Image (tube, rainbow, N blue to C red):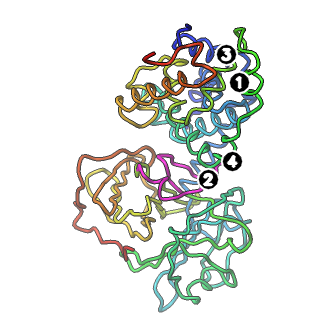
Amino acid sequence: MIDLDELLRETLAGDVEGVALPLDLAEIATRRGQRIRRRRRTLTTAAATGSAGAVVVGAVAISAWAGRPAHSQVLLGSRPSEPPVTRPSQASHHHDAGLVWTNWPTDRRFGTAPSQAFLDAVDPGQPQTVYAEGTMSDGTEFVVSDPTADRGEVPGFVQGWNNVTDFGESVSVGPSMTDGSYLAFQTPTYDAGDLDTATTQWLVVVGAPDTRTASYSADGTSWTSMSVQEGIAVLKLPAIAPVDAQIRLTDGSGHTVQGGLGVTGPVASPSADSSPTATGPSSAP
Amino acid sequence: MDDSSFREYVAARGLALTRTAYLLCGNQHDAADLVQTALSRAYADWGRVSRMGSPDAYIRRIMANQRTSWWRSRRREHLTPGPLLDRVAEDRTDNVAIADLVRAAVRALPPKQRAAIVFRYFEDLDDAAIAYALDCSPATVRSQISRALTQLRQRADLSELVGVEGS
């Protein structure tokens, strides 16, 4: 009889003898890593029209126009960069054309789309697939949408499943997400956008489908609720989130996870927001 | 960000990580993609990752998770036995054939079991380190390895060589 342990050691060691270092590994990893960092830090603001035409992850903020509430849109889709829309005058669109995903679970889709007027104001003439929408504590409306599904493209954006935070940078990853993929409910995924001139950051966390509440803390002490729909949490920040920022998500059963903008882990027990300024979810599903 | 420490790390550890990735994936192409993906994420958080003391652990964890994700999305590809199994079944007498058998058997394991086997028998990691990589408890690691070994022993083409547990 052969010792299986020994057999495994020898076989595995022998198996990798011909494995070579991928060409330009450091260079490629650095480039891709820089893309991830940019995507995290990517935001368009109402004042960012000067950067229109840049190709970055889609996050659109539209300033208030006279007599109307501020409207904002966070795009989950991907398509070529386009010039800014003309109305409202300060709007701009930025898209990452390099992102490709194959699926978006239908159960993440929020059924009630905002008004066509809202969508037209954001992106005239473009069909929108809306995944979540709501109103921020400051009255700003937001919509998380994919404007490109009708073109055969699919969301290429933030999703966390099976403990993996994936920003869509790998076209070989097909997130055929199901509820089962979310069993662990551990790693919230986030994305945000900015341009170099940004003064505002949109933080989008795609939690497990049953994520009911989400909170953000810049310092781990004071917490602010995020608007949550269909497990997608959104928060507009007045500045880029600090590296020590924390996210806390709670699902329908009260299970809470908390962590930084990278790796997260479960917390001992569900805890309520401590910030007196926290606002509740705009409309939980 | 200073890229130099990241590049130094890749220069020092890139091949070892690629080898682990190869054992997790089973082919060089996916291994390259896997290690690139893991390293790019590590780069994105390099300030924090490099302070961890063990970037390897963080990267192993990304690789294991990512590999499982790929496996789920490409599961159909992995349900069909490749020609390797047919070939080795005809000749199990020499060391090469035995290695082929073991290799095929390990590749047929579910991703977490396979990762646990790779981390234990290739990287010589202890339960705690494997638990971190697989995001589970050390007890689960032991259970995954135990199940994997049982599965390997029970394979018809391996049982004669290594014996069935308990027999």
The N terminus of chain B: image quadrant: top right
Question: Callout 4 environment at 10 Å: few (<14), some (14 to 19), or many (20+)?
Answer: some
CA separation in Å, label 3 and label 4: 30 Å
Asked if labels 3 and 1 share a chain, the reply is no
Q: Which residue is mark 4?
A: A172
Q: Nearer the viewer, mark 3 or mark 1?
A: 3
Q: Residue furthest front?
A: B167
User: SS of the residue at dot 3?
Assistant: helix
**Residue drawn 46% across and 79% down?**
A141
The label nearer to you, 3 versus 4, is: 3
**Residue A160 in magenta stretch:** yes
Q: Name the chain letter of the residue that bears numbered label 4.
A: A
Q: Kindly state the secondary structure of the residue where label 4 is placed.
A: loop
The mark lying in front, picked from 2 and 3, is: 3
Are the residues at dot 4 and dot 1 in contact (C-beta closer than 8 Å)? no
Residue A116 to residue A144: above or below = below
For the residues marked 2 and 3, what is the alpha-carbon distance in whole angstroms?
Answer: 37 Å
Please state which of the two labelled residues, at mark 2 or mark 4, is closer to the viewer. Answer: 4
Q: Nearer the viewer, residue A125 or A218?
A: A125
- Quadrant of the rendered structure where residue B5 is? top right
Please name the residue shown 54% across and 53% down the image.
A40
Residue range of the region highlighted in magenta in the rendering: A159-184
Q: Which residue is mark 3?
A: B99
